[in-house]
Image (spheres, rainbow, N blue to C red):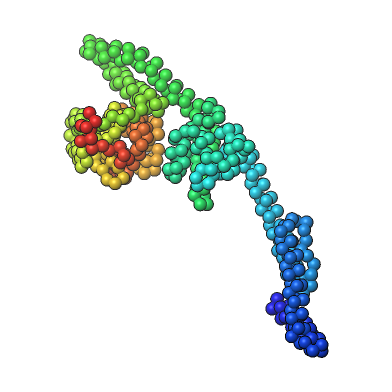
Amino acid sequence: MQHSWSRYLRIILIGLAVTTMIGAYLGEPLYGLLVGLAAYLGWTLVQSRRLYNWLSNPSASAEAPQSVGLWGETFDKLQKLHQSHLLTEDRLRAQINRVQESTNAMRDGVIMTNAQGSLEWWNGAAEHLLGFRRSTDQGQYIYNLIRTPAFKAYFEARDYRDPLELHSPSRPHLRLQIQISLFGDNDRLIVAKDVTRLYQLEQMRRDFVGNVSHEMRTPLTVISGYLETLVDHADELPKKWQRAIHTMADQSSRMEALITDLILLSRIETGEQTADDALTDVEALIQQICSDARALSGDKQHSINVEVTDHRLLRGDESQLRSAFSNLVFNAVKYTPAGGRITVSWSADREGAHLSVKDTGLGIDPIHIPRLTERFYRADPSRHKETGGTGLGLAIVKHVLINHDGSLDIRSEIGKGSEFICHFPKVRLVERQETHEEV
């Protein structure tokens, strides 16, 4: 390129020298030089005009103007760049079309919005699941089309670790699971899955458990009543029946506890018993539960200590909180050897409030911890047989905490005891003075 420029410069200088010599021959060398410069300037302006006209018509069929010299080489290089650009554009357009075709083939709805929530693109499944229309909804804010407060709060929270479930705005019989991912400059990629069948199956399971539990309670109450009568008069029965009667009574009590837990869990899950905005005195609640735990300990003589460093009230359902806290404390009593130590503490920090139940029991193998809150999951089935556990206690705790925007943290090691920590958000803490003012 440097060589070509030098050659073109020499040609220009030679041309000017020729015009100057012609002018000198005519007695006006300066005029000859000016004429040469004017001719070159005019030719340059013509070529510039041709370049401008070509750049103003960037169609694929328009070819670069033909010229000679520096301008000819410039036109040739621009033509090559233009063709390369067209090829790249075609390749990118083909890739975009392929991506759009593949996403349109998906059964899940895929939506792209900018940081403010303005709709930029969506696939065909999104039109079916959410009722979007390309003719009118392009550029609309998505939370104006999905008019659910929970969705707008989820969209703006920017905490997308867990998906959101809601009913379709255009087809209320559909249950959708929404998952959002951030990309680019805080733009959103939203995936909507149809989980209606799973939701219906889960609802059927809950209804089945709740209905069966209610239906079983009445005949079991009758059986338990007769067994209690037989136990009270066991001395009048033949000795070979006495052991059987006592065993039946114990198992009947265990069945009653199981049904009670099933009904409670079913109510919490189905929303029949939801967390209200009442104020709970956690300190007094813990003291009551620990008093009952000492009675449950009996001859085992556990050392049960209470430590309270925060005296604010907790906004939530007291009956649910009682069920959750008592499950943790009573479990510590059941699974801690005689003479062991149990510490129940209530504290708060910048993150929120925390209830800790720590024992000096045998501990739990960490491999079981992720599944402890599953219904009927038993890390050690033999221990449940000895203690009469239903396997639903920690499941109840988990769902109570979900209703109170909380979470459960389990720490345990074999031979070093266990610690169960309930975390509550800071917004649920209320000063006691505020309580008196409200009352």
Please identify the quadrant where the N terminus is shown.
bottom right
**Quadrant of the drawing holding the C terminus:** top left
Residue in front for this viewpoint, 73 or 400: 73
Q: Is residue 326 visible to us here? A: no
Location of residue 357 in the rendering, given as x and y in whole percent from the top left corner: 26, 39
Vertical placement of residue 61 versus 332, above or below: below
Residue 432 placement (x, y as % from top left): 21, 35
For the point 34% across and 38% down, the residue is 406
Classify 212 as above or below 101: above
Residue 101 lies left or right of residue 390; in this view the side is right
**Image-based side of 156 in relation to 51, left or right:** left
Q: Residue furthest front?
A: 27
| Residue nearest the viewer, comparing 191 with 62 | 62
Q: Quadrant of residue 369?
A: top left
Q: Residue at x 47, y 26 (%)?
A: 203
Q: Position of residue 131 (x, y in %)?
A: 58, 33
Q: Is residue 302 left or right of residue 372?
A: left
How many numbered tags mark residues here?
A: 0
Where, by quadrant of the figure, is residue 14 drawn?
bottom right
Q: Front-most of 197 and 240? A: 197
Q: Is residue 439 visible?
A: yes
How far across and down, in percent of the image, does residue 290 sit? 21, 33
Identity of the residue drawn at 40% across and 28% down: 269
The residue sitting at 23% across, 11% down in the picture is 233
